[in-house]
Image (spheres, coloured by chain):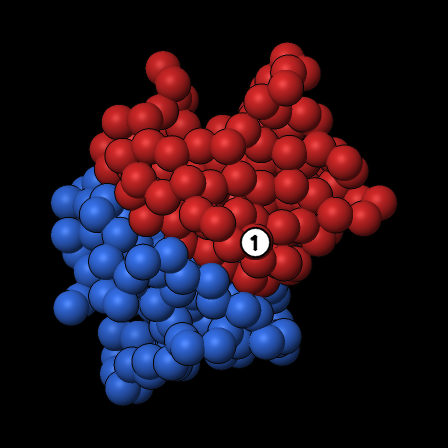
Chain colours: A blue, B red
């Protein structure tokens, strides 16, 4: 079934709950909204919106699937292998399979970004 | 290889050329930028940025692959089957396989949106 998730402003959407990761050494201040995810069951991909609070970071990851990232708000840094890139609104990052990666926020505003993954990596 | 496409402002990106469709009855005023596409060769999906000029529209399509759409600028309408939805910044539309769909711009500004598709649908 087709789904339109209306944006309610401030990057919140109708019918899309916020998932929060428990604080840990691996990940700090990270929330996720599945915009096209377990509910929509797209055959090929999933689309999530992440926010990283000021001073927060995602886990240092390396896995067999790729990421497509589009920065929507705030400023941050993306690590790919040994290199860090500064990013802000509109920047697009392609993280290929099996490359080490991590994101963190910079400044006083949360870093908000879209992240595309293969559907098979979707939590059901 | 990892790729960072820096946003140069106004939804243009370094290293991303603009493709334009020839005007036709089927499609009017539509341009496409492959943000994660033939160059990046992501195994699973492709990410494109489309703009529809004021008064323009995409072709009325129906195909076996799904779309994930995220509106970035302007206002427009999305048709899914027989229904039209008004959309603007932040709205997310999931178009499942085999559902008739079309987009058109509304107002004086181009309608700009991200569109995710399966990698197998990517032009090489």
Residue at horizontal 30%, vertical 86%? A23
Give the residue number, with chain letter if any, for mark 1: B84
Query: Is the C terminus of chain B in the top left, top right, bottom left or bottom right quadrant?
Result: top left
Q: Is residue B39 above or below residue A34?
A: above
Decide which of B31, A19 is in the foreground and name it: B31
Query: Is the N terminus of chain B in the top left, top right, bottom left or bottom right quadrant?
Result: top left
Residue at horizontal 42%, vertical 67%? A50
Residue at horizontal 57%, vertical 58%? B85
Few, some or many C-alpha atoms within 10 Å of disc 1 (few <14, some 14-19, many ≥20)?
some
Badge 1: chain ID: B
Residue B35 is situated, as x and y percent measured from the top left of the image, at 49, 34
Left or right, A47 with respect to A122, comes to right
Residue A94 is situated, as x and y percent measured from the top left of the image, at 39, 40
Decide which of A25, A112 is in the foreground and name it: A112
Farthest residue to the front: give it.
Answer: B82
Q: Secondary structure at mark 1?
A: strand
Residue at horizontal 76%, vertical 36%? B55
The image quadrant that residue B19 belongs to is top right
Q: Is residue A51 above or below residue A46?
A: below
Count numbered badges in the picture: 1
Residue A69 is situated, as x and y percent measured from the top left of the image, at 43, 50
Residue B26 is situated, as x and y percent measured from the top left of the image, at 58, 22
């Amino acid at each position: 079934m087709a789904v339109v998730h209306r944006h309610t402003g401030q990057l919140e959407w109708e019918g899309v709950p916020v998932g929060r990761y428990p604080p840990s050494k691996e990940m700090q201040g990270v929330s996720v909204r599945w915009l096209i995810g377990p509910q929509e069951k797209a055959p090929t991909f999933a689309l999530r919106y992440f926010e990283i609070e000021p001073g927060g970071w995602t886990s240092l990851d390396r896995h067999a699937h790729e990421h497509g990232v589009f920065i929507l708000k705030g400023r941050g840094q993306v690590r790919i292998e040994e290199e860090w890139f500064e990013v802000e609104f509109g920047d697009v990052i392609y993280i290929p399979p099996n490359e080490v990666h991590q994101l963190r926020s910079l400044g006083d505003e949360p870093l908000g970004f879209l992240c595309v993954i293969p559907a098979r990596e979707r939590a059901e």
